[in-house]
Image: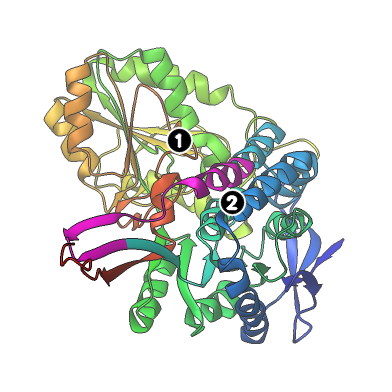
């Protein structure tokens, strides 16, 4: 049994009220440790520590900030086995997946640490007697609130650009997956990050998360999570007039045309809704298949899905509540008349009778108005919808409240460009599923959120632009 404390001002700190929450290992269903149950008092302490560090960090030479970012990246890689073990203990995900997420987390710090050498503004040619330039300045304290599905990776995704831009951070990971974010803060301190630049308050969203969003000294919030919580945060932010980055849900369309490489499309489509046991907002869960290859696709997809092994190549559902919710959709699918192709059940894993495992599940003959086609399930569940024409495929893809990613499979380059242009989503992939890197901006349209993480664009969301205009006095001879 472990016990986790807050990380405030460069040290582990017990919760003000002495309360703790149980943390459950989803692979076993057993309580594995305790997590500090933070509240407004703990957030106040974290914000005070961040405020004390803010001016000093902002005044660090950019090159020195970059060197510390690179040192954090090196520390994450040097501790990859430990960090992967922490991720697995909290999420139950397979080791290769956990290791890949540690590498991705290191890449964020490496990438943004290298961007400090880019120009931080522009010189504008306004008039001969004016010297006008812009500069980017940090907000100050940034609140980072992350979910339970990719804890370390999503913490790094927001923290790295925030720090690189000169901000300080108060982070709150999910109370069920807190270990790796806490480890990140400790490793960053060992890599030379000054005390108070990263602070981690543990606890629930209503107790600790809301206190961060409401705190008058927090000047920007980056949130990844559900649409409902994003809307609640948006209402608070609107009252406070502070900027947000919201990375919310998805029900992404994956379009397979008749001329596609069908075997590749089937394998990648299954990966698209089962990666991380389907617990990713960018999962390609709505699979639109042209009618001429519909049956052949279903056969290939069934084979690919049934090759996955729960407890080995497929991890568990991370929380008990989500485990129950995914099972509830099996009854919803039956009521709506979808045809079960494979799965649709809890998976039994030897040695883990209480584990939260779901068999890879595929439904056919789905219409786009069914609940399983419209609601984000957040489990290893894909639905297959037939279509006849390109125009119908685009209409079905866009008939959703979400707009995170879109994928299409075709050998026709002109069609690929036409369809990519018409799909309402923040990222489009052609003949490959979700190969996003740290360099590629990530974010959504519609209810999938706004703002961008990753890429150079993310830095633009972690600072103000200030314009400075200086009058230039004429030379003694009257010339400018």
Q: Is 7 colored magenta in this rendering? A: no
Asked which secondary structure carries label 2, the reply is helix
Q: Position of residue 133 (x, y in %)?
A: 30, 61
Q: Which residue is mark 2?
A: 63
Residue 212 sits above or below residue 358 on the image = below
First in sequence: mark 2 vs mark 1: 2
Identify the disc placed on residue 385. none
Q: Nearer the viewer, residue 177 or 141?
A: 141
What is the span of residues highlighted in magenta in the rendered image? 105-133
Residue 174 sits above or below residue 448 on the image = below
The quadrant the N terminus occupies is bottom right
Residue 346 sits above or below residue 328 on the image = above
Q: Position of residue 124 (x, y in %)?
A: 24, 57
Q: Is residue 400 left or right of residue 161?
A: left
Asked whether residue 87 is in view, the answer is yes
Q: How many marks?
A: 2
Query: Crowdedness of circle 2 by 10 Å Cα count: few (<14), some, many (20+)?
Result: some
Identify the residue at horizontal 16%, vertical 39% (top origin): 395
Identify the residue at horizontal 47%, vertical 28% (top origin): 270
């Amino acid at each position: 049994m472990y016990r986790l404390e807050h990380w405030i001002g460069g040290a582990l700190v017990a919760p003000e009220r002495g309360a703790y929450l149980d943390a459950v290992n989803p692979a076993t269903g057993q309580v594995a440790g305790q997590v500090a149950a933070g509240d407004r008092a703990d957030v106040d302490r974290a914000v005070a520590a961040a405020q004390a560090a803010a001016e000093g960090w902002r005044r660090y030479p950019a090159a020195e900030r970059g060197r510390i970012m690179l040192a954090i990246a090196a520390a994450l890689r040097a501790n990859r086995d430990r960090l992967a073990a922490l991720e697995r203990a909290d999420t139950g995900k397979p080791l290769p997946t956990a290791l890949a997420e540690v590498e991705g987390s290191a890449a964020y710090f490496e990438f943004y640490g290298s961007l400090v050498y880019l120009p931080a503004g522009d010189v504008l040619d306004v008039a001969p007697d004016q010297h006008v330039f812009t500069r980017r300045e940090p907000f100050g304290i940034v609140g980072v609130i992350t979910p339970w599905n990719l804890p370390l990776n999503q913490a790094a995704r927001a923290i790295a650009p925030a720090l690189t831009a000169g901000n300080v951070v108060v982070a709150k990971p999910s109370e069920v997956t807190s270990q790796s974010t806490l480890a990140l803060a400790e490793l960053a301190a060992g890599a030379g990050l000054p005390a108070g630049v990263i602070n981690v308050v543990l606890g629930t969203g209503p107790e600790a998360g809301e206190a961060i969003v409401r705190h008058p000294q927090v000047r920007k919030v980056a949130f990844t999570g559900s649409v409902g919580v994003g809307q609640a945060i948006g209402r608070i932010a609107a009252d406070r007039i502070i900027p947000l980055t919201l990375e919310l849900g998805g029900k992404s369309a994956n379009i397979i045309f008749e001329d596609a490489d069908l075997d590749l499309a089937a394998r990648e489509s299954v990966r698209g809704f089962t990666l991380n046991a389907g617990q990713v907002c960018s999962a390609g869960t709505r699979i639109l298949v042209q009618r001429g290859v519909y049956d052949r696709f279903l056969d290939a997809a069934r084979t690919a899905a049934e090759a996955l092994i729960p407890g080995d190549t497929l991890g568990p559902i991370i929380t008990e509540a989500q485990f129950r919710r995914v099972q509830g959709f099996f009854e919803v699918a039956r009521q709506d008349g979808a045809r079960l192709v494979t799965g649709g059940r809890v998976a039994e894993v030897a040695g883990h009778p209480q584990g939260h495992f779901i068999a890879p599940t595929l439904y056919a003959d789905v219409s786009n108005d069914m609940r399983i086609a419209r609601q984000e399930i957040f489990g290893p569940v894909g639905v297959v919808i037939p279509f006849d024409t390109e125009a119908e495929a685009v209409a079905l893809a866009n008939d959703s409240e979400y707009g995170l990613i879109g994928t299409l499979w075709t050998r026709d380059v002109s069609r690929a460009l036409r369809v990519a242009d018409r799909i309402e989503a923040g990222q489009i992939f052609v003949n490959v599923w979700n190969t996003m890197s740290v360099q590629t901006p990530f974010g959504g349209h519609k209810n999938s959120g706004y703002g961008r993480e990753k890429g150079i664009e993310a830095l633009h969301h972690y600072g103000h632009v200030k314009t400075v205009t200086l009058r230039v006095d004429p030379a003694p001879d009257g010339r400018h």
